[in-house]
Image (cartoon, rainbow, N blue to C red):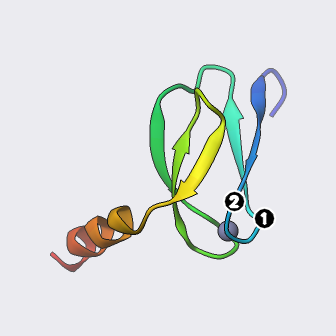
């Protein structure tokens, strides 16, 4: 992973164990599933925050079931 710069690490707000690495050019928002507690998180790379998002989980279910 040499040569890849990061803005920092966002911790999962639910379990505080999962970590989301924000790379240097990351911007905007993205839906990510925590690798530890499997909660779907809405990550804001500009604010460097994450919050649980149930709606995204429901959307994901719908997509997978089809
Ligand atoms: Zn988590």
Residue 4 percent across, percent down from the top left:
76, 25
The quarter of the rendered structure image containing the N terminus is top right
CA neighbours of label 1 inside 10 A, class few (<14), some (14 to 19), many (20+): few
Q: Which image quadrant is residue 36 in?
A: bottom right
Q: Which mark is residue 16?
A: 1
x then y, percent, for residue 26:
58, 27
> For numbered disc 1, what is the local secondary structure?
loop
* Vertical side of 25 occupied by 57: above or below: below
Seen at 69% across and 59% down, the residue is 12
Ligand 1 is found in the corner quadrant, namely bottom right
Q: Is residue 6 above or below residue 58?
A: above
Q: Nearer the viewer, residue 20 or 42?
A: 42
Does residue 44 appear left or right of residue 11 in this picture? left
Image location of residue 13, percent across then percent down: 68, 61
- In the picture of the structure, the residue carrying the numbered disc 2 is 12
Q: Are marks 1 and 2 in contact (CB under 8 Å)?
A: yes
* Front residue of 52 and 35: 52
Q: Most extreme residue toward the bottom, as rendered?
A: 65
Q: Residue at x 15, y 75 (%)?
A: 66
**As drawn, 39 above or below 32:** below
Q: CA distance from mark 1 to mark 2?
A: 5 Å
Instruction: Indicate yes or no: mark 1 CB to ligand 1 under 8 Å.
Output: yes
């Amino acid at each position: 992973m040499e040569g890849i710069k990061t803005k920092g690490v966002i911790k999962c707000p639910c379990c505080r164990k999962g970590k989301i690495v924000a790379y240097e050019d990351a911007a905007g928002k993205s839906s990510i599933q925590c690798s530890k507690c499997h909660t779907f998180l809405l990550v804001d790379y500009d604010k460097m925050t994450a919050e649980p998002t149930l709606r995204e989980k429901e959307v994901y279910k719908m997509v997978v079931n089809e």
